[in-house]
Image (cartoon, rainbow, N blue to C red):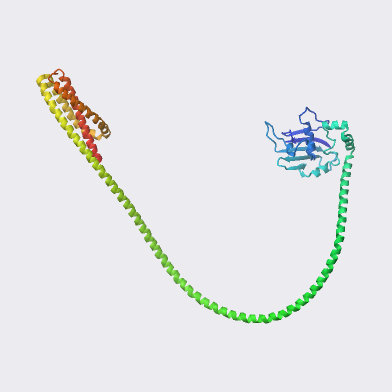
Amino acid sequence: MRLKSLEIKGFKSFADKTVVTFDEGITGIIGPNGCGKSNIIDSIRWVIGEQKISALRSENLDALVFNGSKTRSASGLAEVSLTFENTKNLLPTEFSTVTVTRRFYKNGESEYRLNDVSCRLKDIHNLFLDTGVSTDSYAIIELGMVDDIIKDKENSRRRMLEQAAGITIYKTRKKEAKNKLDATEQDLARIEDLLFEINNQLKTLENQAKKAEKYFEIKGEFREVSIELAKAALEGFNITYKELNEQQDLEVNKRVQLEAEIAVEEAALEQEKVGFIEKERALQSMQQSFNDLLQNLRGKENDKNLATQKLHYLKEKETNLKEFLDKATGQVKTIGDSIEYTQIQVGEEEAKLAELQDAVENAKLDIENKRRNFDERRSGVDALRSEFQQIQRNQFDAEKKVAVADTSIQNLQRAQTQLTDEQSQRAQQLVQLQEALVEKEETLVDKRNVLADLQAHQEKTKSSIF
């Protein structure tokens, strides 16, 4: 038998799968401190069945699993496999290669496998029983064990020699046999105690047996007496049975009569049920008609409510329109008054302009030429009046001109003041008549524009009303 290889995965410092092959000529593993030599020894002892955590240099079983590092995550299980060559059949199995595997999961589960077949720890011990391979054997020696052998600590040298000579197995078997002998002696002592207890109980059982025999005798006598009593009671029961039969016949006749009466009543009840069903059908039809009428009535009421709401809405709309018409009529009246007042002012200004034109004709012939120009411009104003319909169609421009109208009125008032001042100075300022005439003409054009804007606003107001 020879150790061929050791496979470690997730055990202590061996995070990755590590395989150590023991070829011929390899008797030991060496390396610097901290490289994992002792962990290899611990893994071998652990896989062959070591149960003491202190012997594996750990605090608990969870510490046997690789706990991770800064660059590696923790492992979920620890697994160690030993492979032996069994060409000489030293191991009690028919396989030439034997692999022993032990696994421990972090959830607490553990298992042993022999050639990838699940087995018990006892099967592993029995397999290596005659080979000298055990958890405390010297077949695998670590550095600390060498010091113990040299110093002969706790007779370690003698135990190594006994293992080499094959005596340890006999001591183990002797110890097991002694343990079995002690257990057998304890069983014998227990059996003697049981025999003593049984002997003590025999007397009690004999007394109980005598009492049982007497009980059965009394029970037999009681049975005979009970039979006689039952016979006497049976005769009385026969008489009572006959009376009960006669009474039963009477009750049966009464029952037949009652059933006949019940049948008659049930027939009458069925007839009433038929009439009731017909009445119920008529009631259902009447109820359906009533429901139809009620539904129709509700529909009419809904229509009535809708019509009432519509009428109320139309009345409110009519009231609003009346109010709007009243307001619009007032606005139209106000605008008409404004137009009349403006026309009166324009007439007055035209009269004043005519007077000024007469004065200018008497003063200079140049003013007459300018009057002619004025007439020509008036003809241009008439042409502008012809374009009045086109201006009305442009609602957006009309709204803008409403704002301009106010400004124009103010300009007109200022122009009227200027004309009054000019009239008092006409006689003395003949040289400035030409400039005044031009200014008057511009003022007249502005007034015409104001008049056109007011008329456009009036037409717009009428169109919005109607």
Q: Who's the residue at 78% across and 31% down the image?
A: 37
- Which quadrant would residue 42 be assigned to in this image? top right
- Which quadrant would residue 342 be assigned to in this image? top left
Q: Who's the residue at 22% across and 41% down the image?
A: 329
List x then y, in percent, for residue 283. Answer: 41, 66
List x then y, in percent, for residue 310. Answer: 31, 50
Left or right for 232, reference 409? right
List x then y, in percent, for residue 162. Answer: 89, 37
Instruction: Report the quarter where the C terminus lies.
Output: top left
Q: Is residue 94 visible?
A: no
Q: Is residue 251 visible?
A: yes
Left or right for 318, reference 79? left
Left or right for 417, reference 228? left
Tally the marks: 0
Instruction: Report the quarter where the N terminus lies.
Output: top right
Relative to 360, residue 59 above or below: below
Outermost residue toward the top in this view: 431
List x then y, in percent, for residue 365. Answer: 11, 19
Residue 362 or residue 47, whichever sits in front? 362
Left or right for 70, reference 373? right
Residue 202 or residue 121, whichever sits in front? 202
